[in-house]
C-alpha cells in the first residue's frame, strides 16, 4: 500500500510553491519525521507535517515523487514544535518549510541515516538535576527576590520582571530553573539572551549551579557540529537547560516548562534577515501553547511589554502579563548620579568636556575604572577634502565609508566594500584630506593623548602609563578577542574602557565607577518613533555598569556617576533618566503613541522591495498597494505611499518600503495573507520587472 505524505521543505522564497509538497511513501511515516526528498535536481531535508493519507491508485497522485531515506532513528518532532513553526510562518508571512528547516541544525541536512544513528548512540545523560549545595547555600535572597519567586511559583502565564540593574534578576532565573528541575524529572528550561557575547558568562553561572551535562548552548557563533550536538541533547531531553540567542526559541524541547527572556527589550531579539520574527513574542506564544511559564526580564522593558503588564484600572481590564518589581540593587551601591553636560556651553569642537576629563582623571588616580561609550565604530564617519568638498562615499551604497586609521582603510559598514585610504583627494588631488566626525577608534586615540602624561597608581618601581582599551565590532573580530579583552577589564588592567553599545549590556564590571555617553543626541529627533525608547534603555543599561560593587565603592570612598554630554539638556528624556524613573518615561511615551495611533495601540508591517532602480522598487510597491484595494477588509488597513529607505542603496541595490498600519492585528493579518498571491503574481507583470526581491516585515522594529 502507498501513502501520500505532506512534507515541509525549504523552497525558494518567491517560488510560490505553497507551504507543503506531497510525496509518495511505501510506509506511513509519523508527523515530525525527518526525511530526504527530491526537489528539482537536488535531494533535500524535509519534515513530514501531517498524518499520512492512503493512495488507492485511482487518484492521479501516483505521479508523486517517492520519499527518499527517513531519518527514523531520531524521534519525530513534536506537535507543539510544529504548531510553533506553523504559527510563526503564518504570522510573519513566510513558508512553513523556510521556518522549519532554518530552525534545524544545518548538519542534519548532510548526515546519512547511518551517520545520524552513530551520533545518537553517543553517551547522553538524563535524570534528576539539582543545584549544587555550595552555590545554593551561599546566596541569600533579598526580600524582593523572595516575593518575586513566590509570585512566580503561585501563578501561571507570562511575567514581566522589572528589575533594576544589579537587583539580582539572574539569581531569580537560577532559582526558578532549580525549583522546576527539582520538582519534575523530565522538565526542561529555555533561557534566552539577546547577544552571543552575553552567553559565556551566563553559561558559566548555570554550569556552576547545575553541572556541565545539564546545560547546552544554541547560537550562531557555534560550529555546525556543536550546534548539532546541543540540538540533539535538547531534542532527546538529555539537556535540561538550553541557553541561547533568538534562534533558540525554535529549539526542540519536548519537556519545556519554563522560558526566560533576559533583557527582553533588546532589539536583537528581532530577526533582521529572512523570516523577520521576534523571538520574544514567539517565546510568549510558545509558553501559552505548551503551558510553560514565561519570564520576561529587563530594567527597561519594551513599551509593548510594559503596556501588556499594566494593572486593571476603571474600564481598562489591564494587560495579559503579571508585572513583578525588583527596584533595589543587591551588593551594589545606589544607582549612579546622572550628570548632564550642556555642550552648548562648551568651546566649539569640544569632544570631552573639562569637567568630564577631570572626573575620569580622579578615577584613574584612585585606581578605579571608567567607561566611555560612543555608538559609532571606526576612526571617523567620513574622510573629506576641504578644497573641493569630496567625501568618502561608498560607490555601491548611499552611505559614507568609514575611515579606520588602525589599518588605513575606508570601509563601508553596509556592503563591506573596503579600499586603502588615498594619498590625495581622488577628485582634485589635494593631499590634505582629513577625517570629519569621530568614532570609537579616534576617541580612544584622543583619550590616550589627553592622559599621555598621567600614570596609573601601583606598587611597581617604574610608573605605568594609563591603559585605555577599546571594545567594538572591529576590535573583537578575532576568535577569543572579546573574552581576553573583558578579562583584562575584570582584572583591573584597564583604566578607561572605550566602546560601542557592546560594552553597555549585561557585563558585570565590578570596578567601574564612572560611565560617560559622549554623543547620544542623534536618537532624540530621529524619524524612527522607537529611537527615544532605545536611547533611554541604552543609557539606563549603561548607567547600570557603574557602581555594581558596594563594598568596593565603600573601600574607595567613591560614588558612582553617569555623565551625559548633550546639546539638549532640557529634554524630558534626560529628566526621567536623572531620576532613574522608567515609569515616568514610559508613561510620557505611551501617551504620545496613543495620541498618534502608534504601537502598541496600532499594528504595523512593512512591504519592502529591492530593485536595480529606485523607480522600479517604488513602482512595484505602488502597484501592490493598488492591487490590495480590492481585497476584503482593505478599508481597515492604511497603506502609506512608498518611500526610499533611510539608506536607500546598498551594494548597488535600491531599496524602498511601504508602511502598512491598522488598529486591528486581525485585520492586518487577514490583508497580508490575502495579499501574498497578488504579490507573487505582480512579480511576473511589467511592474515587477527589475525587482530583485520583496519581503514583508511584520511588527518592524525600525522604520
Image (cartoon, rainbow, N blue to C red):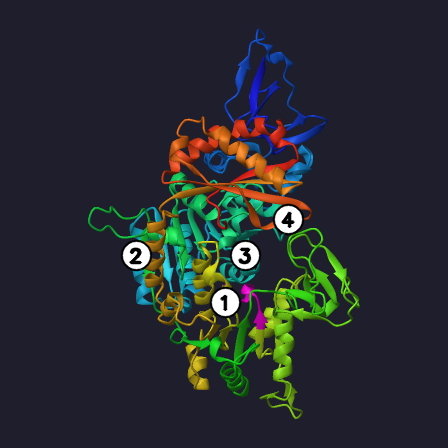
Q: Is residue 503 magenta?
A: yes
Q: Nearer the viewer, mark 3 or mark 1?
A: 1
Magenta region = 498-505
Label 3 Cα neighbours within 10 Å, binned few <14 / some 14-19 / many ≥20: many
Q: Nearer the viewer, residue 230 or 80?
A: 80
Residue 486 x %, y %: 59, 69
The residue that label 3 is drawn on is 195
Up the image or down, 91 lies above or below 63; here it is: below
Label 4 Cα neighbours within 10 Å, binned few <14 / some 14-19 / many ≥20: many
The residue that label 1 is drawn on is 520
Label 2 Cα neighbours within 10 Å, binned few <14 / some 14-19 / many ≥20: few
Outermost residue on the bottom side: it is 461
Up the image or down, 438 lies above or below 417; here it is: below
The residues tagged by marks 4 and 1 sit, at their Cα atoms, a distance apart of 26 Å
Residue 351 in sight in this render: yes
Q: What element carries label 4?
A: strand
Residue 71 in sight in this render: no
Q: Is mark 2 on a helix, strand or loop?
A: helix
Quadrant of the image containing the N terminus: top right
Q: Which of marks 2 and 3 is in front?
A: 3
Q: In which quarter of the image is residue 6?
A: top right
Asked whether, in this view, residue 317 is left or right of residue 114, the answer is left
Residue 79 x %, y %: 47, 33
Considering only order in the chain, which callout, 1 or 4, is on the residue closer to the N terminus?
1
Amino acid at each position: 500500500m502507498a501513502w501520500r505524505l505532506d512534507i515541509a521543505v525549504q523552497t525558494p522564497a518567491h517560488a510560490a510553491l505553497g507551504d507543503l509538497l506531497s510525496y509518495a511513501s511505501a510506509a506511513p511515516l509519523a508527523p515530525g519525521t525527518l526525511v530526504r526528498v527530491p526537489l528539482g535536481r537536488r535531494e533535500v531535508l524535509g519534515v513530514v507535517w501531517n498524518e499520512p493519507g492512503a493512495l488507492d491508485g485511482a487518484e492521479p497522485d501516483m505521479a508523486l515523487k517517492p520519499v527518499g531515506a527517513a531519518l527514523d532513528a531520531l524521534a519525530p518532532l513534536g506537535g507543539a514544535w510544529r504548531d510553533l513553526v506553523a504559527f510563526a510562518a503564518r504570522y510573519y508571512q513566510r513558508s512553513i518549510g523556510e521556518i522549519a528547516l532554518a530552525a534545524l541544525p544545518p548538519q542534519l541536512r548532510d548526515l546519512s541515516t547511518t551517520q545520524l544513528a552513530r551520533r545518537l548512540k553517543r553517551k547522553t545523560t538524563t535524570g534528576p538535576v539539582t543545584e549544587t549545595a555550595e552555590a545554593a547555600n551561599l546566596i541569600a535572597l533579598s526580600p524582593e527576590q523572595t516575593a518575586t519567586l513566590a509570585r512566580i511559583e503561585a501563578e501561571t502565564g507570562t511575567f514581566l520582571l522589572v528589575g533594576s540593574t544589579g537587583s539580582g534578576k539572574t539569581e531569580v532565573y537560577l532559582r526558578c530553573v532549580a525549583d522546576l528541575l527539582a520538582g519534575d524529572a523530565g522538565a526542561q528550561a529555555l533561557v534566552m539572551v539577546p547577544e552571543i557575547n552575553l552567553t559565556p558568562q551566563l553559561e558559566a553561572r548555570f554550569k556552576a549551579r547545575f553541572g556541565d551535562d545539564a546545560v547546552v548552548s544554541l547560537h550562531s557563533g557555534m560550529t555546525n557540529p556543536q550546534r548539532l550536538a546541543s540540538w540533539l541533547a535538547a531534542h532527546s531531553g538529555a539537556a535540561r537547560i538550553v541557553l541561547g540567542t533568538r534562534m533558540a526559541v525554535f529549539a526542540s524541547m519536548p519537556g519545556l516548562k519554563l522560558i526566560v527572556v533576559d533583557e527582553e527589550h533588546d532589539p536583537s531579539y528581532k530577526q533582521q534577515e529572512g523570516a523577520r520574527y521576534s523571538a520574544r513574542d514567539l517565546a510568549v506564544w510558545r509558553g501559552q501553547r505548551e503551558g510553560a511559564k514565561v519570564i520576561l526580564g529587563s530594567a527597561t522593558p519594551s513599551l509593548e511589554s510594559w503596556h501588556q503588564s499594566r494593572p486593571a484600572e476603571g474600564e481598562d481590564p489591564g494587560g495579559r502579563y503579571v508585572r513583578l518589581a525588583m527596584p533595589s540593587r543587591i551588593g551594589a551601591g545606589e544607582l549612579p548620579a546622572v550628570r548632564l553636560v550642556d555642550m552648548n556651553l562648551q568651546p566649539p569642537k569640544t569632544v570631552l568636556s573639562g569637567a568630564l576629563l577631570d572626573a575620569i582623571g580622579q578615577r584613574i588616580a584612585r585606581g578605579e575604572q571608567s567607561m566611555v561609550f560612543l555608538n559609532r565604530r571606526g576612526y571617523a564617519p567620513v574622510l573629506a577634502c576641504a578644497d573641493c568638498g569630496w567625501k568618502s562615499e561608498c560607490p555601491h551604497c548611499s552611505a559614507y565609508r568609514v575611515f579606520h586609521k588602525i589599518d588605513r582603510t575606508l570601509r563601508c559598514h553596509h556592503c563591506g566594500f573596503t579600499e586603502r585610504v588615498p594619498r590625495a583627494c581622488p577628485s582634485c588631488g589635494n593631499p590634505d584630506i582629513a577625517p570629519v566626525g569621530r568614532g570609537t577608534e579616534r576617541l580612544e586615540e584622543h583619550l590616550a593623548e589627553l592622559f599621555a602624561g598621567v600614570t596609573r597608581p601601583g606598587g611597581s618601581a617604574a610608573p605605568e602609563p594609563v591603559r585605555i582599551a577599546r571594545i567594538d565590532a572591529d576590535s573583537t573580530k578575532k576568535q577569543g578577542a572579546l573574552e581576553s579583552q573583558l578579562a583584562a577589564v575584570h582584572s583591573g588592567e584597564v583604566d578607561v574602557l572605550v566602546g560601542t553599545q557592546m560594552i553597555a549590556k549585561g557585563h558585570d564590571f565590578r570596578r567601574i565607577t564612572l560611565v560617560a555617553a559622549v554623543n547620544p543626541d542623534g536618537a532624540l529627533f530621529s524619524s524612527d518613533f522607537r529611537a527615544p525608547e532605545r536611547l533611554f534603555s541604552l543609557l539606563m543599561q549603561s548607567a547600570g555598569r557603574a557602581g555594581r560593587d558596594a563594598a568596593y565603592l565603600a573601600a574607595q570612598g567613591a560614588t558612582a556617576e553617569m555623565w551625559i554630554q548633550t546639546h539638549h539638556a532640557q529634554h524630558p528624556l534626560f529628566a526621567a533618566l536623572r531620576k532613574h524613573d522608567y515609569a515616568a518615561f514610559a508613561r510620557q511615551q505611551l501617551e504620545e503613541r496613543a495620541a498618534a495611533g502608534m504601537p502598541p495601540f496600532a499594528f504595523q508591517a512593512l512591504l519592502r522591495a529591492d530593485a536595480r532602480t529606485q523607480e522600479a522598487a517604488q513602482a512595484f510597491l505602488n502597484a501592490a498597494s493598488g492591487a490590495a484595494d480590492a481585497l476584503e477588509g482593505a478599508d481597515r488597513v492604511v497603506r502609506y505611499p512608498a518611500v526610499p529607505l533611510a539608506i536607500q542603496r546598498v551594494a548597488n541595490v535600491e531599496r524602498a518600503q511601504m508602511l502598512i498600519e491598522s488598529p486591528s492585528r486581525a485585520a492586518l493579518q487577514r490583508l497580508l495573507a490575502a495579499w501574498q498571491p497578488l504579490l507573487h503574481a505582480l512579480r511576473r507583470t511589467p511592474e515587477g520587472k527589475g525587482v530583485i526581491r520583496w519581503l514583508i516585515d511584520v511588527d518592524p522594529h525600525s522604520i
